[in-house]
Structures are given as C-alpha cells and as structure tokens.
Amino acid sequence: MAQIRNLHWWTVEYGLIGDLRKPKIFGAGLLSSISESYNCLQDPVKKIPYSIAAAQTAFDITTQQPQLFVTPDFAKLSGVLEEFASGMALRKGGIAGLEKARETGEVATVVWSSGLQASGIVGQCIELRGEPVYIRFSSATALSYNNSQIEGHGKGHHAHGFGSPAGRIEGTSTPPERMTDEQINAFTDKEGITTFRFESGVEVSGTVSYTRRHKGLVTLISFTGCRVTFGAHTLFDPDWGIYDMAVGEKIISVFPGPADPSRCSGVPRGLCAATGGARSTPRGPGGHRIPGLGRQYQLDTSGYQRRRRTKSCNDRFEHRGAHSEPQRRSYLNRRAG
C-alpha cells in the first residue's frame, strides 16, 4: 500500500511532464499551491526521470518537495504503472502473494491455474523451492469460478476451513487441470482408491465421488474416505468427511476480498488468532520448509493502517503559498469567525 501511495503522490499529486529541463505541471497538488507551482520549476528542486523507483521514494506532506519526478509523456507513465502492476500479487500469485495475504489476516482469494478460486483467510502454506505446494485457509471458505460461487461450495460447506495442494502429479507430464478422465482413472487401483502423489511429496488418496470441469479444465475433485499427507504430517483425515481438492499446477493470482461478494458476505475478517513469538520452522522430506506447521506468528498490521495528520490553520495557510502577515491574519480571522 505504501508503494501505491508513493506512485500516486509523485504523479497524480506532484507529477511533472515533458522535457527534464523544462517540464510542465500536471499534478493536482502542485497546481493547487501558488508558491509551490512556481518553486517546483526552479533549479533548486531536483528533477528526476520518472521510473519504478518512484514507488520506493517516500515524501513529507508538511513541506515543499525537494525533488520531483518527470515523465516524458503519459505513455511512459502507463508503462511504469504496468511494470509495477506486473509484480503485484493479483498478477503474480505464488508464495509471495500468499504470504502477503496471510500477513494481513483478512479475507483474500487464491486462484489456481485451472481458474478455481478459494476465498477465506489464508493460513498455512507449505513451500518447496520457492513454490507453494499446499494451501490451507483458517476460516470458513467459499469456492468460486469466474467470480461466481460454485453451488454447494459456499462458506457453510467449508465452515471449518479449506486446504488443497498445487503442483504436478508424479507419473504424468500433464498439468493436473488438463488431465482427461482416462488419465485420472490411471491413478485408481482395483479397489477403486485413487492416489495422487504430487512431485512435492503431498499425497492424496481416497475414492473419487465426482470431478468438476469448467471450460474443459478440471477445477475440483471430491473424495470420500480421503487421507492427505505430507511426510509425517496428516493434512486431512478420512474421519473429517468429504475432501474437495482444488486442482491446478500453479497459484496464478492472490487478491484481497472474496471472489463473489454477493454470496460471500459474512466470511470472517480481522486478525488471525495465532500470535506469539516465532519459533523455528519444521522441515519436510528433502529439507524444505513447512511454513506454519508447528509455528506461531505475531501479525503486525500497523503498516496497513493509514495515518492522518491534522494540520493547524497556519499549516494550511502556509502550504497554499500566502506569506504576508496581513493575509495570514485575515485568513485566521475568517476561520475563527
């Protein structure tokens, strides 16, 4: 959020455009101040070519800016914003997006490469070589496709949370969402037990009750009598009921809020309950980390809270650029009257 705020400040509020040596003003904050709109074009104010670095440049709202960014044109401005957007969790997904969602402790939507969407509070994520291989939600969860909740898979059905693997299955080069019924049946033994051993080490074994597809891709497989394990860890026990497995090789997107707000009202928001000092993270087969298992997190959301600064009448008056004593007194008298 701080980076988005910075980009907004150095463009919409305090942006310059055109030639670096003779730029023009397009930022509303500059245009609203007579003194600063004049001073910003003078040599003492440093002019910097606009780039993605603006996202990392903080500012002080209580004083005139010592430097400003200059974009040659709006095409360059759009290009930088596109570059920034490409690194956001909404487009990037993966472990980085999941960690951002988990740290907020609020409802987020995770999207598998099949298009399946799960909306809830992101909890534990098992990671292997920088990729998420098992995602677990710690709250009631709703499943959707194309921002529309799947019938029978609202938060009432997944009231105690949801968990599912991501990645490829051993024994096939086909991404799981693109497997045919014949390929799925190839993992079923004579007793009717289907066992998927993922390359990550996650294993799902049970009786397939149905397979759901959207636009030709497998999005959801439901099991009865299912057990899900990762090394010595049991991720789902047959006694817990039906296991619904989201299908997809990758996590392609993570974004805040529910996928289908009209059907997802009431999904709990707020901080995760788990708090306390961080302890060492357990490791699974092959020595890779298992974030969240046997570990507590102290969540700090202060960085997401927008702080407001109350300015005095003097602050507001000086910021607008009127400097003579009679003008200042007239302004303050009007405010007081």
Image (spheres, rainbow, N blue to C red):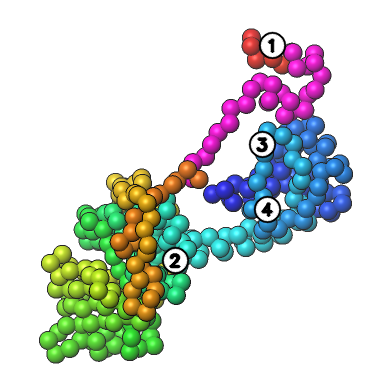
| Residue placed under numbered mark 4 in the picture | 54
Bounds of the magenta span?
A: 304-330
Disc with the residue nearer the chain's start (3 vs 4) = 4
Asked if residue 236 lies left or right of residue 108, the reply is left
262 or 257: nearer the viewer: 257
Q: As shown in the figure, which amino acid type bears the numbered disc 1?
A: Asn
The quarter of the displayed image where residue 116 is located = bottom left
Secondary structure of the residue carrying tag 3 is loop
- Tell me the distance, in whole angstroms, between the alpha carbons under discs 3 and 1: 25 Å
- Tell me the distance, in whole angstroms, between the alpha carbons under discs 2 and 3: 35 Å
Q: Residue 100 in magenta?
A: no
Quarter containing the C terminus: top right
How busy is the neighbourhood of tag 2: few (under 14 within 10 Å), some, or many (20 plus)? many
Residue 32 locus on image (x, y percent): 72, 34
Residue 88 locus on image (x, y percent): 53, 60
Secondary structure of the residue carrying tag 1 is helix
Q: Which residue is drawn at 17% across and 69% down?
A: 237
Q: As shown in the figure, which amino acid type bears the numbered disc 2?
A: Ile
> From the viewer's perspective, is residue 195 above or below residue 79?
below
Disc with the residue nearer the chain's start (2 vs 3) = 3
The quarter of the displayed image where residue 315 is located = top right
Q: Can residue 218 be seen in this view?
A: no
Q: Residue at x 33, y 78 (%)?
A: 285
| Residue placed under numbered mark 2 in the picture | 95
Of badges 1 and 2, nearer the viewer stands 2
| Residue placed under numbered mark 3 in the picture | 61
Q: Which residue is drawn at 67% across and 43% down?
A: 59
